[in-house]
Structures are given as structure tokens and as C-alpha cells.
Amino acid sequence: QEQDRIYLQTLFKKDLNENEKEWLKTKFEEQKALEKAILEAKTYAKKASKAIEKYDNNKLNDIIKAMIDREF
């Protein structure tokens, strides 16, 4: 885990070769990084939707709904 963290830091702002890209992809899949990011984004979108309810702005609500329901 610590070794991975150190290696990840060496990749920062670097033009990655194919092996480095593959390593990142594997780590993202292992950690379910994309799924976690999508879930967090949806959580914030739902909070935003709740926060603007009182303004009765249908266009903005539609944008938020589209973002929540979007498939990746």
C-alpha cells in the first residue's frame, strides 16, 4: 500500500508510458475508484438538487437530474 502510494507520486505530472498507464488502470479497478467517484458525484448532485428546491428552477433541476441519471 505504501509502496503503491510512493510509486503513484512519481507519476504525477509525467507523460506516462504504456506500463504506467496499465498500472494506474489496474489500481483504479482494484480500488473501485471510478465507482466511488461516481457515487460521490451523485451524492453531491442530490444535495444540490435539495438545496435549490425552494427556487423552483426547473431547468437547473433538469440539469442535475440528467447528471445523476447519466450512464458512464
Image (cartoon, rainbow, N blue to C red):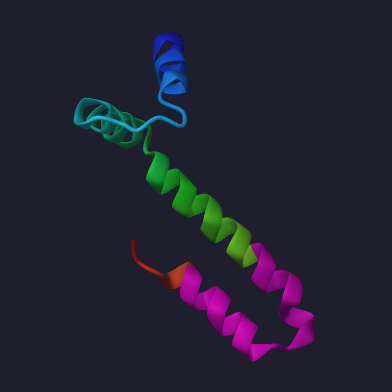
Residue 24 rendering spot, x and y as whole percentages: 32, 31
Left or right side of 57 for 29? left
* Viewer-side residue, 11 vs 71: 11
| In magenta stretch: residue 28 | no
Q: Quadrant of residue 57?
A: bottom right
Locate the C terminus and report the quarter of the image it occupies.
bottom left
Q: Is residue 37 above or below residue 70?
A: above
For the view shown, which residue lies furthest in the top direction? 3
| In magenta stretch: residue 53 | yes
For the view shown, which residue lies furthest in the front direction? 15
* Viewer-side residue, 58 vs 2: 2
Left or right side of 18 for 28? right
Locate the N terminus and report the quarter of the image it occupies.
top left
Q: Is residue 35 above or below residue 21?
A: below
Residue 25 rendering spot, x and y as whole percentages: 28, 35
Residue 35 rendering spot, x and y as whole percentages: 40, 47
Q: Quadrant of residue 48?
A: bottom right
Q: How many marks?
A: 0
Residue at 38 percent of width and 32 percent of height: 31
Residue at 27 percent of width and 27 percent of height: 20
Predominant SS of the magenta segment: helix
* Viewer-side residue, 29 vs 24: 24
Which range of residues does the magenta coloring cover? 47-67
Residue at 70 percent of width and 71 percent of height: 50
Q: Is residue 20 above or below residue 29?
A: above
Residue 27 rendering spot, x and y as whole percentages: 32, 29
